[in-house]
Image (cartoon, rainbow, N blue to C red):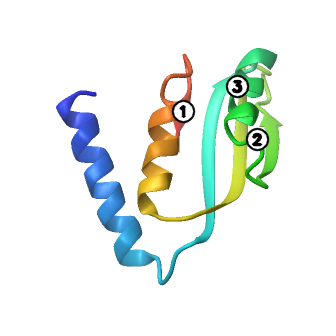
Amino acid sequence: MDKKSEEFYKRLKEELENTTAKWPTEYLFKFIVPSQPQKIEEIEKAFDQMGAVIETNQSKTGKYTSVSINVRMKDSQSVIDKYIEMSSIEGIISL
């Protein structure tokens, strides 16, 4: 992981810890991926067995799909770890 990414995740962790009253808590992940079934499946598999509620919405042109995942996370580090895991999916954008 490059220095810029490390700094981003460090800031995100601090923000999560400062704005979240207690853990575990519900967290909303939002991603945008190219509209390819295998990309969406990869995301869904990453949250399998976690009790996640997953919603997808295709863009007007059909080129991209937004994926919203509402899931209970145990702490700020588990959120960071999930973002890092998802970054390995080619073409994914985390919001």
Question: Which amino acid lies under the numbered mark 3 shown in the image of this protein?
Answer: Glu
Please state which amino acid type lies under the numbered disc 2: Asp
Instruction: State which tag comes first along the sequence, 3 or 2.
Output: 3
- In this rendering, does residue 36 appear at all? no
Residue 22: image x %, image y %? 50, 81
Q: Quadrant of residue 46?
A: top right
Q: Position of residue 88 (x, y in %)?
A: 50, 23
**Is residue 65 toward the left or the right of residue 13 in the image?**
right
**Secondary structure state at the residue bearing disc 1:** helix
**Image: 60 above or below 70:** above
**x and y, in percent, of residue 53 in the image:** 80, 54
Residue 48 tag number: 2
Residue placed at 57% from the left, 72% from the top? 24
Q: Residue furthest bottom?
A: 21
Question: What whole-number distance in Å separates the C-alpha atoms at marks 1 and 2?
Answer: 13 Å
Distance from Cα at disc 3 to Cα at disc 1: 9 Å
Q: What residue is at 56 percent from the left and 22 percent from the top?
A: 89
**66 left or right of 21 in image:** right
Q: CA distance from mark 3 to mark 2?
A: 10 Å
Q: Earlier in the sequence, mark 3 or mark 1?
A: 3
Which residue is at the front of the view, 81 or 55?
81
- Looking at the rendered structure, the kind of residue marked 1 is Met
State the SS at label 3.
helix
The mark found on residue 86 in the picture is: 1
What is the quadrant of the N terminus in the image?
top left
Task: Tell me: residue 94, above or below residue 52.
Answer: above
Q: Residues within 10 Å of mark 3 (few under 14, many from 20)?
A: few
Residue at mark 3 = 42
Determine the residue positioned at 71% across, 37% down: 66
- Total of numbered circles in the picture? 3
Point out the residue furthest to the left here.
Answer: 3
